[in-house]
Image (spheres, helix red, strand yellow):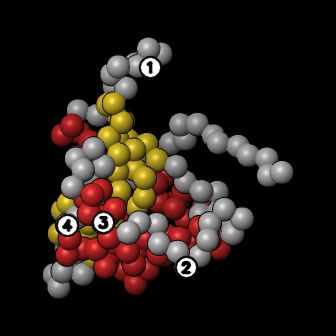
Amino acid sequence: MEIRRACEKDLAGVHSLLSQVLTVHAEGRPDLFRAGTRKYTDGELLGIFADDAHPVFVAVGDDGAVLGHAFCEVQDFRGSNNMQPILSLYIDDICVDEKCRGRHVGTALYQRVIDFARELGCYNVTLNVWACNPGAQRFYEAMGMVPLKTCLEQVL
């Protein structure tokens, strides 16, 4: 397995993974997520792949198949009036193909993200986990992540 930045040849694999993520979210929160839709067009994904402020890493097998992805966003708080002057790396999305789970693909992707954040000099790595996805929360806690804040809602 190789972990590298995503490129055009990864489009189909990334779309497939994004669909798997959407299915989990739509099943857990059908009031918010629409199953069967696409999050990005090919053009939008290619733009994200090329954007150094939004790096996307993919885990690929020996055959070139995309086994997992990690969408990230570099957040720069160095110009903030009320925040400490830090760089942070936000993980917008990590997904491992359902057929590849249990093979440490997620751990390898997460470690690559951590290494990348360290290379940038980031203070921390953050992410959000939907309450309807307790398996993801357990994974991130096993990676050493701890709660930073709590987001609450009241559906009207």
Secondary element at tag 1: loop
In the image, 12: left or right of 127? left
Q: Is residue 22 above or below residue 108?
A: below
Which residue sits furthest right?
A: 156
User: Mark 3 and 4 residues: CB-CB less than 8 Å, in contact?
Assistant: no
User: Mark 4 and 2 residues: CB-CB less than 8 Å, in contact?
Assistant: no
Q: Amino acid at mark 2?
A: Gly
- Residue drawn at x 22%, y 47% is 52
- Give how far apart the Cα atoms at labels 2 and 3 are: 19 Å
Q: In the image, which is nearer the foreground, mark 3 or mark 4?
A: 3
User: For this rendering, which residue is in front, 22 or 43?
Assistant: 43
Secondary element at tag 2: loop
- Residue drawn at x 27%, y 58% is 47
Q: Is residue 82 above or below residue 147?
A: above
Q: Label 3 belongs to which residue?
A: 43
User: For this rendering, which residue is in front, 98 or 83?
Assistant: 83
Q: Which numbered disc, 1 or 2, marks the residue that appears first in the sequence? A: 2
Q: Label 4 belongs to which residue?
A: 7
Q: Amino acid at mark 4?
A: Cys
Q: Which numbered disc, 1 or 3, marks the residue that appears first in the sequence? A: 3
Q: In the image, which is nearer the foreground, mark 4 or mark 1?
A: 4
